[in-house]
Amino acid sequence: MTETFVHLLSYLEPILCAMLIVFLVRSKAVREYAYLVALLGVRLLCSVIFLPVIYLSGHVIERHLAYQIYFYVYWTSYALEAILSLMVIYSIFKLAMAPLKGLQTLGMLVFRWVAAISVAVAIGVAVTPHLSKVSFMVAMVTQLQQTSSILTLCLLLFVGFAIRPMGLSFRSRIFGISLGMGFIATINLVDAAWLSHSAQMYSALNIVNGVADCIALLAWSAYFAFPEPKRRFIVLPTTSPFLRWN
């Protein structure tokens, strides 16, 4: 039963990804949220590769070959998603801080340094004696994904506090994307902690991951399916810390 539900979610996710890309194109927001489109494209492409490989494994494709295809495609896409998630966070911060150019410039500079240090730390943590190339890749990508998840949660916290001073609302797409990314990031961190204790292919966590991804995709679809409220013009008081920092 669990395996069947996991397979059902694996078929539902690419459909939701394609639907969200259509909404992004229809709302003419592709250029503004290009990294999100790229992230969705990677997930959609991987699903298109995974599903036939899983279905044909043991019949048309030899099982060992099918596993190798799945393994390398999975970890390559996992790395790309971690990198693109960082870029989505970067673009969301840039859009959120658009009214305050000084803070935007400083924040983007800090973000670049933090992202570079995070990548260096991920590589450093993965480097251990007698580690094979495959194990090194898995360890590095996993660490990079965890770092990306932590930065995403930090962004969500910042957007939550700064949403009113920046002239945004909870119906704005900036907040919606941040919320969805934060939701997925939380699940990824729980996933990493769980996998260090359990290696079962089909577990309750697989269902949680699939359901979380589908909820995030549905939420994003709702944000892009309907018109976004116009951003308010902000006039910060002279006592505002945002104005002083800017």
Image (cartoon, grey):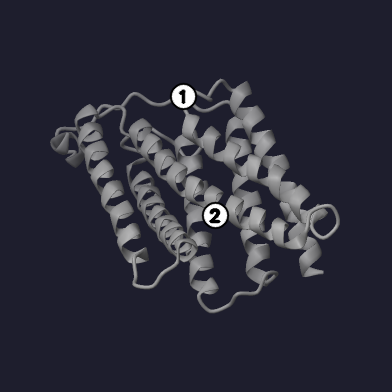
Q: Quadrant of the N terminus?
A: bottom right
Q: Residue at x 31, y 33 (%)?
A: 97
Q: Label 1 near label 2: C-beta < 8 Å? A: no
Q: Which mark is residue 115?
A: none
- The percent position of residue 23, horizontal first and vertical second, equals 64, 29
Residue beneath the point at 70% across and 45% down:
49
| Label 2 environment density (alpha carbons within 10 Å; few <14, some 14–19, many ≥20) | some
* Residue closest to the far bottom: 197
User: Residue 206 occupies which quadrant of the picture?
Assistant: bottom right
Q: Residue 228, image x and y in percent?
A: 53, 28
Specify the quadrant of the image occupied by residue 8.
bottom right
- Please, what secondary structure does the residue beneath circle 1 have? loop
Q: Is 54 drawn above or below residue 13 in the view shown?
A: below
- Viewer-nearest residue: 3 or 179: 3
Q: Nearer the viewer, residue 6 or 97?
A: 6
Task: Name the kind of residue labelled 1 in the image.
Answer: Lys
Q: Is residue 93 above or below residue 137?
A: above
**Residue 61: x %, y % from top left:** 79, 54
* Residue 102 left/right relative to 47: left
Residue at image mark 2: 75
Is 132 on the left or on the right of 166, as rendered?
A: right
Q: Secondary structure at mark 2?
A: helix
Callout in the foreground (2, 1): 2
The amino acid sitting under disc 2 is Trp
**Mark 1, residues whose alpha carbon is within 10 Å: few (<14), some, or many (≥20)?**
few
Give the mark nearer the N terminus: 2 vs 1. Answer: 2
> Image point 68% across, 35% down: which residue?
18
C-alpha span from label 2 to label 1: 40 Å
Residue where numbered disc 1 is placed: 230
Q: Where 214 falls versus 31 (above or below)?
A: below
